Image (spheres, helix red, strand yellow):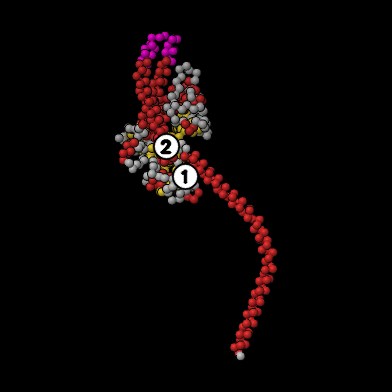
């Protein structure tokens, strides 16, 4: 009896629970029917729009792929090499010029390999790392010694002078443009050799012409000798040009020229140069002033350094207006290196002439560069029939001499005088007591 009552109560409870679930589902159905209908209608409206957006995305992707292919085609036919690496320095892509420059015969476009495995150039690898670390464009130049697996081809493969310009890209990638400068260097070498040979051939006939002119000078009376004097000046100018060209060619071919290095007291040397040029300065009523230490000892070739200041002071005299002053200011600078303080001697030569134009300043030390016409003739000799202008090699020779001494020179315009400002730096500064000669 008790068991029957239990099952009867259980059946009533289950029936009541089922009835509640049915009622709940009906209520939810009535509640959600409008929403379901709304979402269904919205879905019908959104599907065409979504399909349109998908089509637009696919078209945009195709356009980007086509644009990428266009850029790759342009880079393939570009006259410079280009390569791109990922964040791990794996070569992603390079154009035909880069393959030829770096001799990447075994690389295929679908391959992704470390650049250093393909190209044994630690300079290139270092440039890429610098670009990635600094996140700024970098440039570098070096001589690339190409490797080759075929020993028979080794004699035909020559080293190349490369210039690289790199730039950071997203996701740690780096792009590098490569320029093969070897053909230009070869052309310059052939040109210099041709000019040098020509200069050697000209020396003998020019010397003979000068001897003939000297003979005529002693036999002709005024006013006929005026033209012979003019001829002598032009012959001397040509002889000086030939000699300067030969000298400059030898210096550039051998930057570490043989120097007769010894202790040179620079203050006395500058004074000696000025004494030599003083007759020219007096014509313009020019004065000279020196400021700085009295004892300036450097280790240098005295004759070469004398030539440097002779050329610079001569230029200042030529281009200075009358009744002005030519200044030389000397001072000792100190820089820090691994061994401590390293003194540097700085010489500033300043005049009050016309100075240099901004367009000329980057080219002042180039051979045969004349620049602004205001500096292409000597003011004090401008009305003279026999005025001899410079040959455009003097400052190029000055720069090469200073480079051979481990020094440098920079051309500027002085902010106060408006004239030329030549700043020289010497690194072989000696103590005052070291006045003996050095071999």
Q: Is residue 33 above or below residue 316?
A: below
User: What residue is shown at x 38% (from left), y 30% (from top)?
Assistant: 189
* Residue 325: percent from left, percent from top: 49, 29
User: What residue is shown at x 34% (from left), y 41% (from top)?
Assistant: 148
Residue where numbered disc 1 is placed: 175
For numbered disc 1, what is the local secondary structure? strand
Mark 1–mark 2 Cα distance, whole angstroms, equals 17 Å
Q: Residue furthest bottom?
A: 1
Are there few (<14), some (14-19), or many (20+) residues within 10 Å of tag 2? Answer: many
Q: Which residues are magenta?
A: 210-230
* Residue 178: percent from left, percent from top: 44, 40
User: What residue is shown at x 36% (from left), y 29% (from top)?
Assistant: 250
Q: Is residue 85 above or below residue 370?
A: below
* Residue 270: percent from left, percent from top: 40, 30
Are there few (<14), some (14-19), or many (20+) residues within 10 Å of tag 1? Answer: many
Looking at the rendering, which quadrant does residue 251 occupy?
A: top left
Q: Residue furthest left?
A: 439
Is residue 329 visible in the rendered structure shown here?
Answer: no
Question: Considering depth in this image, is 222 or 228 the residue closer to the camera?
Answer: 228
Q: Earlier in the sequence, mark 1 or mark 2?
A: 1
Question: Considering depth in this image, is 60 or 184 the residue closer to the camera?
Answer: 60
Is 211 contained in the magenta span?
A: yes
Is 333 contained in the magenta span?
A: no
Magenta span main SS: helix
Residue where numbered disc 2 is placed: 180
Is residue 98 visible in the rendered structure shown here?
Answer: yes
Q: Quadrant of the N terminus?
A: bottom right
Question: Considering depth in this image, is 165 or 298 the residue closer to the camera?
Answer: 165
For numbered disc 2, what is the local secondary structure? strand
Looking at the rendering, which quadrant does residue 145 occupy?
A: top left
């Amino acid at each position: 009896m008790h068991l029957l009552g239990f099952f009867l109560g259980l059946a009533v409870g289950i029936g009541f629970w089922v009835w509640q679930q049915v009622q709940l589902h009906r209520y939810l159905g009535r509640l959600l029917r409008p929403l379901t209908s709304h979402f269904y209608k919205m879905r019908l409206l959104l599907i065409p729009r979504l399909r349109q957006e998908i089509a637009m995305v696919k078209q945009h992707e195709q356009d980007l792929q086509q644009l990428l292919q266009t850029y790759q085609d342009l880079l393939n036919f570009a006259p410079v090499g280009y390569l791109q690496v990922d964040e791990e320095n794996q070569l992603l892509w390079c154009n035909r010029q880069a393959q030829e420059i770096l001799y990447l015969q075994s690389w295929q476009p679908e391959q992704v390999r470390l650049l250093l495995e393909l190209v044994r150039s630690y300079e290139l690898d270092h440039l890429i790392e610098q670009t990635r670390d600094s996140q700024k464009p970098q440039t570098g130049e070096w001589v690339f010694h190409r490797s080759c697996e075929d020993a028979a081809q080794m004699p035909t493969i020559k080293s190349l002078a490369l210039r690289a310009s790199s730039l950071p890209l997203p996701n740690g990638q780096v792009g590098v443009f490569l320029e093969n400068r070897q053909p230009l260097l070869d052309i310059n070498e052939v040109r210099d050799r041709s000019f040098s040979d020509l200069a050697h051939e000209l020396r003998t006939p020019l010397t003979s012409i000068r001897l003939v002119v000297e003979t005529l000078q002693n036999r002709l009376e005024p006013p006929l000798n005026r033209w012979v004097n003019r001829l002598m000046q032009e012959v001397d100018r040509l002889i000086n040009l030939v000699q300067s060209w030969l000298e400059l060619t030898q210096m550039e071919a051998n930057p570490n020229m043989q120097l007769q290095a010894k202790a040179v007291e620079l203050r006395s040397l500058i004074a000696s140069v000025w004494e030599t040029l003083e007759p020219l300065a007096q014509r313009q009523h020019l004065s000279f002033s020196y400021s700085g230490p009295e004892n300036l000892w450097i280790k240098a070739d005295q004759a070469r350094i004398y030539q440097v200041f002779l050329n610079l002071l001569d230029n200042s005299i030529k281009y200075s207006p009358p009744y002005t002053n030519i200044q030389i200011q000397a001072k000792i600078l100190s820089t820090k290196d691994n061994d401590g303080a390293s003194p540097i001697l700085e010489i500033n030569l300043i005049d009050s002439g016309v100075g240099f134009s901004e367009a000329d300043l980057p080219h002042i030390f180039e051979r045969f560069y004349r620049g602004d016409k205001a500096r292409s003739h000597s003011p004090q000799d401008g009305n003279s029939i026999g005025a001899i202008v410079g040959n455009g090699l003097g400052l190029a020779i000055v720069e090469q001499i200073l480079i051979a001494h481990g020094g440098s020179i920079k051309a500027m315009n002085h902010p106060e005088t408006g004239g030329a400002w030549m700043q020289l730096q010497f690194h072989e500064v000696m103590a005052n007591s070291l006045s003996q000669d050095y071999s």
